[in-house]
Amino acid sequence: MADPIKTCPDICPATGLIEEPKSFLGAGESRGPENPNATPYVPGNFTQRVPRVYPPGAPPIYLPQPTDTTSGDILGMGPVGPWASGHLDWTPNAGTTGVRPVVDKYSITRYSTGEWRQNNERILNPRATNKGAALEIQIKKDLNDALGKMDNKLNDTNKKLDKRVKDLTFWKKKVEDALNAITVELATLDANRVKLKGACRILMMPEAISRECLELRTNRYEPDLVRDDAEQELIKEVAIVGEIRRVFSVTLAKVEEMMCNLKAAKSSIEFDWSDKNLSLKLDKINLSLSPESNLILYHPGVARWTDNSVGLEYWEHYCSESIFNCDEVRQKSEALRSDLMTAIVKGSQDMKIQADRTNQAFGETVLATQQMCAALEQTLKDNLQKIVDIENLIEYLKESLRQVDERNKLVMTRLHTRNYERPSVENCRDEAQFGLMAEAKFIKETSESLADKMRQADDVRNELMQYRGQLEKEIACKRKSLQIDEDRCARVRAFMPTPEEFAGA
């Protein structure tokens, strides 16, 4: 025979339920203590409050004590009083909105005594005062060091300026000697100036073509502003024109050859003398200035290297080279060179070879640009497709979030019904309640995870959109470069003079 079902005799008695007669309270009668867990009041059960004892050497009672605990103050309840019973764990989140403290009829407990003492210590700690005193000492020390270093720098700069003035005076004297010598030599060759210009006139066409191509290529957009092979060959063309012009002046007859070289050298040495004279004057003025001078002003942005500044080694090389060139030209003015026509033929052949190399470099550059443009267009198509895929994924995530929200509303509705509509003891923590709580937690975590994935997908879409703009900009840049190299430069280079034209000049 099966065992009878075990039941609680107080709740579910085995015998039949006997309905007790109902009774009602009379006027003025009490329903009993509001807290059913509180012990009834017993006269004479109260004792004196035990004073709290702090260890020796403890700080004042308004500062944190060694006896303070972070595990929580237990708020017990005496045998009398209408206040709510229970306890609260004190945590660093006690001041955060959303923490529910113990609430009774007359007060709301929010912070513990230990937190109150910690706040007193934070207010009384003079961090700003100590920081200000340390800052004042440090600033005075740094200021004294800075002033001393500035004085040392000023003395060092004055010494260097004085040495620079002496160097400029030395080189200026040497340039003046070279200038006087070349002026005397130039006076004897002035009659041949017209023939010299006629010999160099033919070189203006290839030089103009090369410079025009270089100028056109400066209109390329910034990513394509590179010094490629075509750019290098164009620069070589410009350099070759200058070299051929120099060779023409050397290979002319004694008067015809040396006139251009002497004028160029004289002009160069005059510019060099003028620059040195002006630089010497300015450096002398700078050397005479001091912090007490009334000619000094603010000049923002001057503490930088200018675009046309050069190194000291190059300056010394330029000075010596300029004087050497003048002396060399002056000495060669009395000698005869090769025949002018031979020089023209050889120069035209060299220019033809360089023009073919430049055209070949243009062809390679155009081919590479075309291939890059095709690759960019294919990459743009792939990027657009990926943008569409990411946008579809975002829409799918939005739909999934809407479904998760529906589940969330469902579990919240169930919990609300069970928490606030079940009466009395029926509002128990059964397995269904635990299951609903677990489901609510899982739904919240799932929603947060989907929202994070939504943000990630949106960031990826923004990156793809930026990449799309970069690709479109690069494609426009490559097409602009192709238009310059294929159309405009090729049309200009069609007028490059041939060796026969040079020979017929």
Image: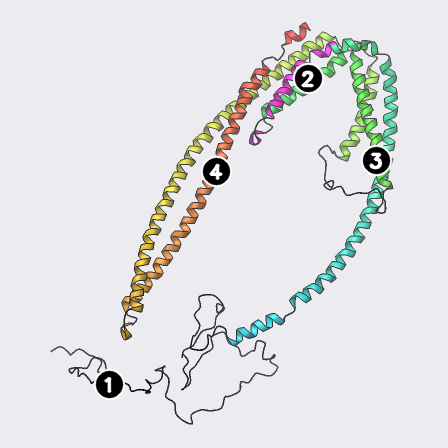
Q: Position of residue 164 (x, y in %)?
A: 84, 37
Query: What is the C-alpha distance between the residues marked 1 and 3?
Result: 117 Å
Kind of residue sitting beneath label 3:
Leu
Q: Nearer the viewer, mark 1 or mark 3?
A: 1
Marks 2 and 3: in contact by CB < 8 Å?
no
Q: Residue at x 41, y 86 (%)?
A: 80
In primary-sequence order, the first of circles 3 and 2 is 2
Query: What is the C-alpha distance between the residues marked 4 and 1?
Result: 83 Å
Q: Which mark is residue 282?
A: 3
Image-quadrant location for residue 36: bottom left
Query: What is the C-alpha distance between the residues marked 1 and 2?
Result: 125 Å
Marks 3 and 1: in contact by CB < 8 Å?
no
Which image quarter holds the N terminus?
A: bottom left
Q: Which mark is residue 23?
A: 1
Kind of residue sitting beneath label 4:
Tyr
Q: Does residue 75 sit above or below 336 in this rendering?
A: below
**Magenta span covers which residues?**
198-227
Marks 1 and 4: in contact by CB < 8 Å?
no
